[in-house]
Image (spheres, grey):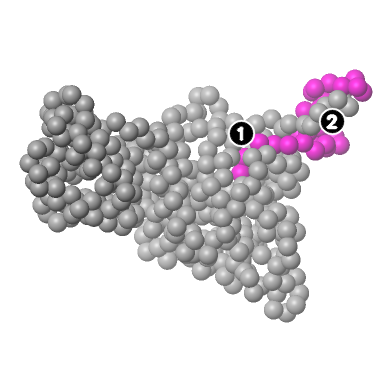
Amino acid sequence: MILWPPAGTIVRDQLQLCIQEELSKRGYAMVHTPHIGRLGLYRTSGHFPYYRDSQYPPMVDPETLGRFASEGRTCGELANRLAGDGEPIDGYLLKPMNCPHHIKIFASVPRSYRELPVRLGEFGTVYRWEQSGEIGGLTRVRGFTQDDAHLFCMESQVGDELRGCLDLVGLVFGQLGMNDYRVRVGLRDPNSSKYVGTPDQWTKAERDCKEAAAALQVPFSEEPGEAAFYGPKIDFVVSDILGREWQLGTVQCDYNLPQRFELSYVGPDNRRHVPVMIHRAPFGSLERFVGVLIEHFNGAFPTWLSPEQARILTVSDSCRDYGEVVLRAFQDAGIRATLDASSERLPAKIRAASEMKIPYLLVVGPRDQASGAVSVRVRDLQRDIGQMQLGDVVARIRDEVQARRLQSFAAERGK
């Protein structure tokens, strides 16, 4: 039996490939940023010390640490200085979010209005110090990967870019049959002091988000106090098979961070203007999304997403060689298939494979070998559909995978 990589790796990689193909069509530039950043980046953005309790402690380089020790200063004083109490010193922080890094990429070269919007995407791993009682499986972890992107655009482009982001989230959910969700628009609480930026900026950003959410033509709720500290956001809250709700995809409109980092572009009037920044992540985090997806499909992933898409089962030892031929035919077509040529009886092989919820079981016996065929059992139908020519089965499963269809070819054809 061929051993595949761990099943979760395959599911995650296929999800990432699916959205990356769509991002390429939509003009995104994919980037990679470091796992640590200078503390000053997060001071400027406002993430530190605002989210200090949910971040890993700042780090200092050996030279700074040695200087403090030689001067007889305490670790407590060093920690206070890192936190900004007194004269601040710089350090490093495990990346709690990708925004400041993408901002630095945008700011690395002069920008013109002609090249806007600039869309930067990254599957970036970030780190949050979640309390021990808050951690749970894949849905709440301390290191997670966001399908993150930041769009930099002119104010006149905000509406179109927000709608494009929401369309992408809807496309992802539709691709996976996740139709049980609600939309909420997180607004600021006027009585809270946690928000940065001017009232005028917030008014414009909240207007943009509400108009974009209305364009979805689905009911949405407005929830004061649920905005990010730098701007309002549109969240997609998905219900799993048990009725539990999970916040997954998110789109945020931000007039504030571009000003804090003094971003600019040259407009058609040959003057400098501040861009608007849009944050978006259709999956939210890949780890949480995979966890919810397992519940959503009850482990029975569609063929394109299944870690193992087909298993060949031999009736007897005499069919092993033909089983190898069938296996190579599937593998050559890019289908993730394995061969069970063990000495177990066929009913036991079928039972073991069925428990793993593999979409297709292909039984090969002497009659199949003689006619160049396989006997097909389909998980979605929970029954055999009879003998089919090997080439026909391979082509149909390959087409189903490439189209990323939710149903098997047999279920779609009513067999």
Report the residue at 41% width, 53% height from top: 18
Where, quadrant-wise, is the N terminus in this rendering? top left
Q: Secondary structure at mark 1?
A: helix
Name the spot of residue 314 as percent of width and height, x first. Answer: 17, 34
Q: Report which residue position mark 2 lands on.
A: 64
Query: Residue at 19% of width from left, 33% of height from top?
Result: 320
Q: Please tell me which residue is depicted at 44% across the width and 33% down the height of the picture.
A: 138
The image quadrant of residue 414 is bottom left
Count of numbered badges drawn on the protein: 2
For marks 1 and 2, give the one nearer the viewer: 2
Report the disc number at residue 54: 1
Image coords of residue 402 (percent x, y): 32, 55
Residue stretch rendered in magenta on the structure: 69-97
Is residue 48 among what the camera can see? Answer: yes
Say which of 5 and 113 sits in front: 5
Q: Check if residue 279 falls in the magenta segment.
A: no
Residue 331 placement (x, y as % from top left)? 31, 45
